[in-house]
Image: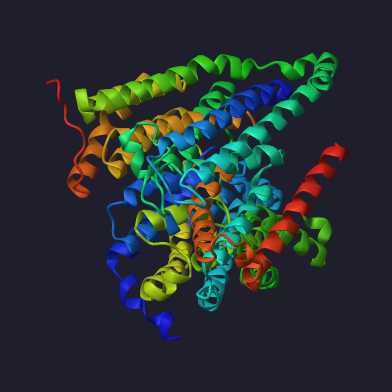
Amino acid sequence: MDFIFAGFDQIFHLQNILLMVGGLVIGIVIGAIPGLNVPLAVALALPFTYHMPPLAGLSMLIGIYKGGTHGGSISAILINVPGAPAAAATALDGYALARQGKAGKALKLSIYASVFGEIVSDIALILLAAQLAKIATTFGPAEFFALGLFALTIIGFVSGDSLIKGVIAGCMGLLFATVGMDPLESMPRMHFGFYELTGGLHFIAMIIGLFAISEALIQIENSLKTSASRTVIEISKKGDDNRVTWAEFKMVFPTMLRSAPLGVFIGAIPGIGSSIAAFLAYGMAKNMSKQPEMFGKGAIEGVAAAESANNGVCGATFIPLLTLGIPGDVITAIMLGAFMVHGLIPGPTLFTEQGSFVSAFMIGMLITSCLHLFVALIGLRGFIQAIKLKRSLLFPIVIVLCITGTFVAGGGQFPIYVMLGMGILGYLMIKFGFPIPPLLIGFILSPMIEDGLRQALLISDGNLDIFYGRPIAMGFLVMTAALVVWITWKQLRGQSNS
Amino acid sequence: MNMARVDIIAGVLLCAFGIVIYFAAPLTVGEYHEVGLTPWSFPSALSAIIAVLSALLGWNGWRNRRREAANLEADPEADQETGEASATPHIFAAIVVMGLYIVGMPLFGYLLATGVALLLLSIIYGNRRWLGLFAVAAVAPPALYFFFQEVMIILLPEASLF
C-alpha cells in the first residue's frame, strides 16, 4: 500500500490535472471525428509533451487515450459511423436508440459505462502491476530475449489478412531499430554514411510519419471520393430521452459489472485489443439478457456492455507494458515510445528505480477516469459538433502540426525528412496491404531481443543451454513456439476455407 | 487493386532490399575483431529473413495471378480504381508541398511557409471555400507560432532570406 501512496504528492499538481483535462478534450474530439483515430492523436501529441516533465506529458497522453477510446462512440451513436473500430459494437444499439429520439440517453449511458470500465481497469492495474513486476525483477538477459520473442507473436494478431506481410513488416521494424549505435559495442552501424543516423531513427518522427502522415495521405483519396455531408441526428428536446434514469442505471449495472472485467482480462493479454473486448461483452450481454430480441433495436444493455468492455481495456493494457515492457496494442506501443522519449524504460526496473513515478502515473490514470466523467458530460454538445468538421479543413492542419511537432521534438530538419520518408513508406504499406502496427512493435521490441540474445550468449560463452536451463525463459520459448504454430495453422485454415 | 500483381511487385522490391542490406550491413561497421555475434549479425539475419519471406510473397502472387485474372474477367468492375487513379496526382502534390514546406521553413520563416503550405494543402484536399481557406491560413500559423515561442519557449525557424 505504501507503494501506491508514494506518488500522490507528485500527481496532484494543477499542471498535471489541466493536462489530463486537455488530453481528454482532444481525445474525445479526435475520437469522435471519423477518419481521425486514437493512435494518430497520441502520435500527434507526443512531440508536444517532449518538453514537459514526464508525468505531465504522460498525463496528457493518457487523457487522449481514454478520451479517444470513448470518443468513437459519439459518431457511432449519432451517425452510425464508429470513430474507432471498437465503437462498432456500440453503434449496433446506440444508433438504433438515436433513431428513436434517444440519442442523449445513449450518449450519456456510453459515458457512464466508459468511465466505469476505465475505473475498474485502473484498479486492476494498481492491484496487479506491482505483483507482476516483483516476479519480473528476477529476469536476466535470457528471459528478456525469450519474452521479447514471445511479445513478437502479437504481430500474428495485428497482421490482418496476410500473416506473411505482417511478419515482413515486423522484421522491417526490427531492422530499422538497428540503425544507429550498436548497443553492446557502441559502434555506429547501418548509418550508410549519414552522420545524423548514428543516433538511430528518430522515434517521434517515425511514429508521426507512419501513423499521421500516412493517414493524411490516405484521407486525400477519401476526401476526393466522398463529398456528401453526414446527417447528424440531433438530440431530442424531451428530458426523459436525454437522461439515464435510476431504474435504467440499475438495470444495466450488472451488465457493466460483467463487461468491465472482461475488458480488463482482454486488455491484459497483449495483442487482442478493444474491438474484440467490445464485441465479446456485447455477445455476452445479449446471451444473458431477458430480452435478447431487443439487441440491435436499441437495447441500452448493448451500449453499456460494449462501452464498459471497450474502455475496460485501457488501464489493463498497461499491465504488460509497465511490468514487462511489452506493448499490448498499437496505442500502448506509442505510449511505450512516450516513456522512452522521457528517459523511462518500462519493465521491472521501472518499479524498483522509479517507484514513486509509477505510483503517481497509476493514480493519474484513476484521476483521469474520474475527470473523464465530468469533461464528457459538460462538453457533450460541443463534442457532437466535432463530427461536422470537414476533412479538407482538418488534415492540412494535421500535416502542419506533424511537421511542426517533429521539428520541435527533433530539433532540426533531418528528423522531418525521416518523418516524411516514413509517411510515404506508411502510405505505400497501406496501399500494398502491409499492416503498419507490426513495424512499430518490431521497432520497439528490437533492443530487448537483440540485447537479450547477445548478452545471454556472452554470459554463457556462446552456449545455448542458457535458454533451456532457465524455466521462465524456456516457458516463454515454448509458448512462443506454440503460438507461432497456432497462428500459422489458423492462417492456413483461413486460406483453405476461402 | 489486383493483389496478385501488388504482391509480385512488393515481393521483388523487398527481396532486392533484403539482399542489398544483407551484404551492406557489415560494410557499415568499422573494424571488428570480437568472435561470436557481431554488430551486423542481427541486421544481416533480419535482412535475410525479409529477403526469403518477400520471395515467398512474390511467388504466392505469381501463383495467384491467373486466378485473380479469371476473377477480374468475370467481374471487370472490381478492378476499376477510379478513386485511386484520380487521387494519385493529389497525393504526389501533397508530398511535394510537404517537401517544399520543410525546405522553405528556414528560408522564408515559419509563419510565411506555414501559411502558404496550409493554403496549398487545403486546395489539394478539395477545399474551395476561399474565405475560410484564407482565414485558416492567416490565423493558424500565428497561433502555433505564439504557442511554441511564447508558451513552450521553443524557437521556430526565422526567415534567413530576408
- The residue drawn where x is 54% and y is 79% is A131
Near-viewer residue (B69 or A382): B69
Near-viewer residue (A226 or A163): A163
**Where does residue A332 sit, x and y in percent of width and height?**
51, 55
Near-viewer residue (B103 or B46): B46
- The residue drawn where x is 37% and y is 25% is B98
Q: Among all residues in the image, which is located at the extreme left?
A: B162
- Work out which quarter of the rendered image holds the N terminus of chain B and state it: top right
**Where does residue A133 sit, x and y in percent of width and height?**
51, 74
**Residue A23 higher or lower than A287, as above or below:** above
Q: Is residue B160 visible?
A: yes
**Splitting the image into 4 quarters, where does residue A255 fall?**
bottom right
**Residue A379 higher or lower than A205, as above or below:** below
**Residue A92 higher or lower than B69, as above or below:** below
**Where does residue A41 sit, x and y in percent of width and height?**
45, 46
Q: Is residue B133 visible?
A: no
Near-viewer residue (A65 or A269): A269
